[in-house]
Amino acid sequence: SSSSSSSSSSAAAVGRLSNISNHLSPTGSNPLVKVSAEVSEALSSGLPVVALESTIISHGMPYPQNLETAKEVEAIVRESGAVPATIAILDGLPCIGLNLEQLERLARLGKNAQKTARRDIAYVVASKRNGATTVSATMFFAAMVGIPVFVTGGTGGVHRHGEHTMDISSDLTELGRTPVAVVSAGVKSILDIPRTLEYLETQGVCVAAYKTYEFPAFFTQTSGCKAPCRVDSPEECARLIDANRKLNLGNGVLIAVPIPKEHSASGSLIESAIQQALAEAREKNITGNAETPFLLARVNEITGGASLASTLDIALVKNNAAIGAKISVALAQLRS
Ligand code: PSU
Ligand code: MN
């Protein structure tokens, strides 16, 4: 592997830290993070690994649907030839790669696991809590152990009225500072998509839409916004990620995959539910890190219980998992 060839790059630092438990804990007694044996072996052999977040499990869906989805997403990653590494903090220990028992524990904890963005990591670790990592925290840990590709459903963004509230997801600043490629279905229109793209530009994030010129809005293929660049295959994504790494740019890459055609007809129905949820959030004065979970839950309820929106949430994360795994396979081939 060429991953440790340029000594000052953060990617190289990440490579050197890929056996981080040993590096940071010479005694082996109190490791800062726990990398599962399977993930650790895959990383040291240069095999493709895909990081997966855990807020989607704890806060995104009810038990047992969340467990089923998490297992299915991992299975899709495996079918496409990569090793899944779901990331969460359990009893204060950041775990990279959860076994079935740990996955089940997190799924049962649901919202009793703390939603953990970058700012929350130190507290959750220090107080030995259980933390479900958002995109920002998952990227942080993925980079720490040298996982270059990360799959999720939708990322955070600039909230509507964010120009007044300054509520801008730390996912965006993380994308600006951490060299991990995030595969998502874009950002939901609960957010301000044009400002999200502006902010990503400010942060120097490479944003590429997959097989389209449009930046997708999760439930819909179009957002009215052009994506800054277009990629048409896993190999092209891999070359983009590799160029970003070799140049030592230090920022992340956001690969936005539009909702597949067979699901996209439902988009407009969901759009009206989103408008209603936004109005309710304003009425109830719901702000801060409670806003995203509130909006997502209300959209699910408005579109009917075991709803359209949650069905699409699951379909999209699975679609992203298949593509993200292929990207990570292409990237591993490029580097071997
Ligand atoms: N958007 C979704 N589904 C999600 C999230 C966002 O469509 O599950 C979660 C992700 O974990 C994301 C986080 O990183 O919400 C962003 O929260 P906030 O807006 O508070 O930064
Ligand atoms: Mn926020």
Image: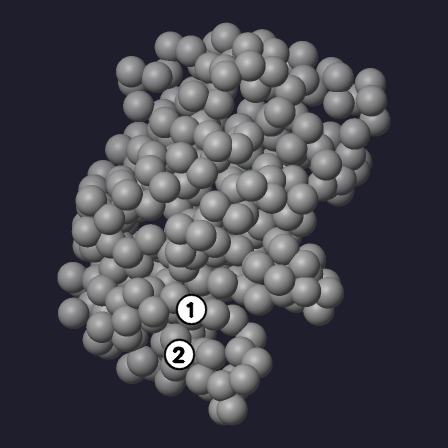
Q: Residue at x 20, y 44 (%)?
A: 79
Viewport quadrant of the N terminus? bottom left
Where in the figure is residue 176, as x and y percent of width and height? 53, 57
Residue situated in front as seen by the camera: 214 or 80: 80
Is there any visible trace of residue 264 in the rendered image? yes
Per the image, label 2 sits on a secondary structure element best described as helix
The residues bearing labels 2 and 1 have C-alpha atoms spaced at a distance of 8 Å
Relative to 29, does residue 162 appear above or below in the rendering?
above
Tell me which amino acid carries mark 1: Val
Q: Residue at x 43, y 56 (%)?
A: 98
Which circle marks residue 327 in the picture?
none
Where in the figure is residue 331, as x and y percent of width and height? 23, 58
Q: Quadrant of residue 177?
A: bottom right
Relative to 222, does residue 78 appear above or below in the rendering?
below
On the image, numbered disc 1 is attached to which residue? Answer: 35
Q: Quadrant of residue 293?
A: top right
Q: Residue at x 31, y 33 (%)?
A: 319
On the image, numbered disc 2 is attached to which residue? Answer: 19
Q: Of the residues under marks 2 and 1, which one precedes in the sequence?
A: 2
Q: Residue at x 18, y 63 (%)?
A: 334
Residue found at the far bottom of this picture = 26
Q: Give left or right: position of 5 versus 169.
A: left
Task: Tell me, yes or no, whether the two marked residues, 2 and 1, touch with CB atoms within 8 Å.
Answer: yes
Viewport quadrant of the C terminus? bottom left
Q: Give left or right: position of 169 versus 37.
A: right
